[in-house]
Amino acid sequence: MLSYEKLLVYQASIRFLRFARDLINRLPRGTSPLSDQLKRASMSVSLNIAEASGKTKDPDKRKFFSIARGSAMECSAILDVCLEFQYLTASEYRQ
């Protein structure tokens, strides 16, 4: 197991990635820009956490953890949009 795989935040990001994948697969036609944005942002969280873990210098680690945090905030906003357009139930949103 690689060091980043042990991080709880990385494990949570992978659980969210699965949730995002399932949501993307059921979004209606005509929402491909939203699907693409959610796909890229949700992958970015996990990938940047892993990359940060591999950095040896603190400024580099901070940079990639910051990018991961920003992508997580973007995912949150996308879920807000999905909720407003009723692509997502309130129960799923809280999950």
Image (spheres, grey):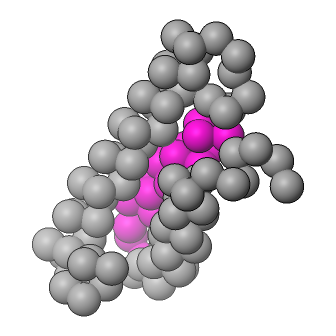
Q: Residue at x 51, y 53 (%)?
A: 9
Give the residue at the far left of this rendering.
Answer: 84
The image quarter in which residue 51 lies = top right
Give the side of residue 2 with respect to residue 72, left or right.
right
Q: Residue at x 21, y 64 (%)?
A: 81
Residue stretch rendered in magenta on the structure: 29-50
Closer-to-camera residue (2/29)? 2
Magenta span: helix, strand or loop, mainly?
helix
Look at 39% across and 70% down and name the residue there. 30
Above or below residue 55? Residue 19 is below
Number of marks in the rendered image: 0
Q: Quadrant of the C terminus?
A: bottom left
Q: Which residue occupies 61% across, 51% down?
A: 7
Give left or right: position of 36 versus 5. left
| Viewer can see residue 87 | no
Q: Is residue 51 left or right of residue 16?
A: right
> Residue 10: in sight, yes or no?
yes
> Is 66 colored magenta in this rendering?
no
Say whether residue 43 is magenta: yes
Q: Quadrant of the N terminus?
A: bottom right
Give coordinates of residue 71: x percent, y percent: 42, 42
Q: Is residue 30 above or below residue 11?
A: below
Question: Residue 20: percent from the left, percent from the top?
Answer: 48, 69
Picture coordinates of residue 87, whole percent (x, y): 29, 81
Residue 15: give x, y in percent of width and height: 55, 70
